[in-house]
């Protein structure tokens, strides 16, 4: 039997928002069973606002996933949610004093390290998962995601990207999601962007906090970061990291075989909405172990 878990005590992080550039302190705190992931925006002099990390609260998906509730928007939730879901934390409350999650180094590794340092505690209720029983598909403009029933418990991901820029090009990545695989294969992969887009992003008020310290930036002749890439296929690994974070908005671990082609936040979040819209394509499993844990 697998039980829900939360963090054993507070984990604190400080940094800046990638898009707002604003300094922010984040405190991840224990939460009760069945509460999932909730953000609490507590800005000085203002009433705290709670935003549940659920698909109904998605407000924007261009360049980052933003949530909103009661007139307050919170930006760039995906890397923190990926770290929590990747480590199989089920319930946590994230307190923030600004409206964007800190970007840290552009990956999920600082969150993984901070969360592992405080540790997880098992709670009194079994963990439930959503197991796909019939195929689902979302697509737009030549991009698509297919979600198929799988013979084994857990989530298997096959993700392909295809960028015109020769420094990225076509990349494929296959992963059986488990805490160990998340930490070893995905967590360190940083967000990436193209130097040619930086002026456009800044003109839209985005990427104000972006720098070579928290993003891979790709120029005409290749990667501009002095240290180069952390993995030869870091971009596709980061897309899978983003996917894991966006899937956390389902509210339950997902079991099935997911195949994604040139996808991104918009399609990831549409897939979550499609799963919720089609309860005839899945069933709950209660307390069972994914294959990655059973072996
Ligand atoms: Zn990302």
Image: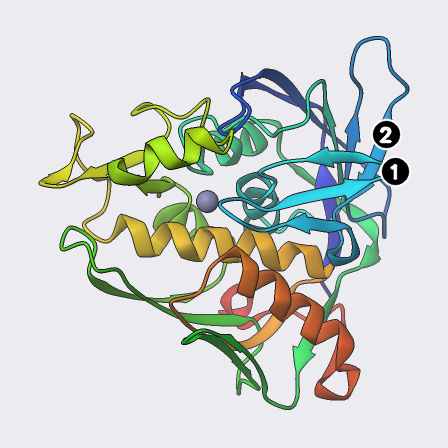
Image quadrant where one finds the N terminus = bottom right
Residue 87, given in percent of the width and then of the height, sits at 56, 47
Residue at position x 47%, y 72% from top?
Answer: 156
Q: Mark 2 — residue?
A: 49
Could you say which disc has been placed on residue 98 in the image?
none
Q: Residues within 10 Å of mark 1 (few under 14, many from 20)?
A: few
For marks 2 and 1, give the one nearer the viewer.
1
Q: Secondary structure at mark 2?
A: strand
Which colour assignment does the render follow? rainbow
What's the residue at 40%, 28% (across, down)?
105
Provide residue 198's location: percent of width, then percent of height.
34, 33
Asked if 6 appears above or below 15 in the picture, the reply is below
Q: Residues within 10 Å of mark 2 (few under 14, many from 20)?
A: some
Q: Which residue was labeled with disc 1? A: 70
Tell me if I can see residue 269 in this picture. Answer: yes
- Specify whether 179 is left or right of 211: right
Which residue lies at the image location 24% right of the left edge and 63% below the top edge? 171
- CA gap between label 2 and label 1 equals 7 Å
Examine the rendered structure and indicate whether residue 102 appears above or below residue 70.
above
Quadrant in the picture for residue 220:
top left
Q: Are marks 2 and 1 in contact (CB under 8 Å)?
A: yes
Q: Position of residue 44 (x, y in %)?
A: 80, 9
């Amino acid at each position: 039997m697998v039980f829900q878990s939360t963090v054993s005590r507070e984990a604190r992080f400080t940094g800046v928002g990638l898009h707002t550039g604003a300094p922010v302190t984040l405190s991840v705190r224990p939460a009760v069973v069945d509460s999932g992931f909730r953000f609490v925006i507590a800005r000085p002099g203002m009433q705290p606002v709670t935003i549940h990390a659920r698909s109904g609260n998605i407000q924007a998906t261009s360049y980052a996933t933003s949530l909103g509730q009661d007139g307050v928007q919170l930006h760039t939730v995906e890397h923190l949610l990926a770290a929590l879901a990747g480590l199989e934390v089920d319930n946590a409350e994230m307190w923030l004093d600004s409206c964007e999650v800190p970007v840290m180094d552009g990956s999920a590794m600082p969150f993984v390290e901070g969360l592992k340092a405080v540790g997880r505690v098992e709670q009194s209720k079994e963990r439930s998962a959503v197991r796909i029983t019939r195929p689902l598909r979302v697509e737009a403009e030549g991009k698509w995601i297919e979600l198929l029933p799988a013979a084994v418990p857990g989530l298997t991901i096959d993700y392909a990207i295809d960028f015109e820029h020769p420094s990225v090009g076509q990349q494929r990545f296959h992963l059986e999601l488990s805490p160990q695989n998340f930490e070893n294969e995905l967590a360190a992969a940083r967000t990436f962007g193209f130097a040619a887009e930086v002026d456009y992003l800044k003109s839209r008020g985005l990427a104000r906090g972006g720098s070579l310290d928290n993003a891979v930036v790709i120029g005409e002749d290749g990667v501009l970061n002095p240290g180069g890439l952390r993995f030869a296929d870091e971009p596709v690994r980061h897309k899978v990291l983003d996917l894991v974070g966006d899937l956390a908005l389902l509210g339950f671990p997902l079991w099935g075989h997911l195949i994604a082609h040139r996808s991104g936040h918009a399609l990831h979040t549409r897939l979550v909405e499609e799963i919720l819209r089609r309860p005839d394509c899945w069933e709950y499993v209660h307390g069972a172990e994914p294959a990655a844990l059973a072996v």
